[in-house]
């Protein structure tokens, strides 16, 4: 199949009953919303889905005026007043925890109370497995923001 503009040209005609029909001057078929394809024969009754009621435009043309589109791109020279939510400002970056904070948990093969309960759940308290001798501030379980 290929596109031919002649296939998309239709002639409009108002019938005696006030309905409009559209037909192809090249193929003489009526435009129809139904499945029946019929040729347009003046004076003959067209199929019901080939008859359309025209309607006058009741919307004033002033409502069709659209505003000029705004530019949605940003320029490097824009001042901060155009960025009220601080989207363009640099954000805080995360710093990784020091390598000395990664410490291996005791193995269950060690047969020690610490090995069988490395997080201190059974013993009723949690063990700071990331402390590694640096104290509570030295190793944090979450990344630190700067």
Image: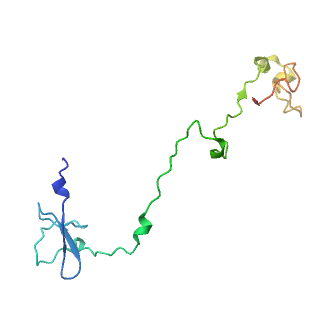
Residue sitting at the far bottom: 17
Tell me which corner region of the image, top left, top right, bottom left or bottom right, holds residue 141.
top right
Q: Position of residue 14 (x, y in %)?
A: 20, 76
Q: Nearer the viewer, residue 51 or 62?
A: 62
Q: Is residue 45 left or right of residue 114?
A: left
Q: Is residue 89 left or right of residue 100?
A: left
Q: Against 3, is 37 above or below?
A: below
Tell me which corner region of the image, top left, top right, bottom left or bottom right, holds residue 37.
bottom left
Q: Position of residue 17 (x, y in %)?
A: 21, 82
Q: Nearer the viewer, residue 139 or 9?
A: 9
Q: Against 94, is 107 above or below?
A: above
Q: Nearer the viewer, residue 122 or 98?
A: 98
Q: Position of residue 89 (x, y in %)?
A: 67, 37
Q: Against 41, is 8 above or below?
A: above
Q: Is residue 42 left or right of residue 80?
A: left
The image's colour scheme reads rainbow
Which residue is painted at 10% across and 75% down in the image? 42
Quadrant where the image shows the C terminus: top right
Q: Position of residue 107 (x, y in %)?
A: 78, 19
Which residue is painted at 67% across and 34% down in the image? 90
Callout count? 0
Q: Against 101, is 58 above or below?
A: below
Which residue is painted at 40% across and 69% down in the image? 61
Which residue is painted at 75% across and 18% down in the image? 99
């Amino acid at each position: 199949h290929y596109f031919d503009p002649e296939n998309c040209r239709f002639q409009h005609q108002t019938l005696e009953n006030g309905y409009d029909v559209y037909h192809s001057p090249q193929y003489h078929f009526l435009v129809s919303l139904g499945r029946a394809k019929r040729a347009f024969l003046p004076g003959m009754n067209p199929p019901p889905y080939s008859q359309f009621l025209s309607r006058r435009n009741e919307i004033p043309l002033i409502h069709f005026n659209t505003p000029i589109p705004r530019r949605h791109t940003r320029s490097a020279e824009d001042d901060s007043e155009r960025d009220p939510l601080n989207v363009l400002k640099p954000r805080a970056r995360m710093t990784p925890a020091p390598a000395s904070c990664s410490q291996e948990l005791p193995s269950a093969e060690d047969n020690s109370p610490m090995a069988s309960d490395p997080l201190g759940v059974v013993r009723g308290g949690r063990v700071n497995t990331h402390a590694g001798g640096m104290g509570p501030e030295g190793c944090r379980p979450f990344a630190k923001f700067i």
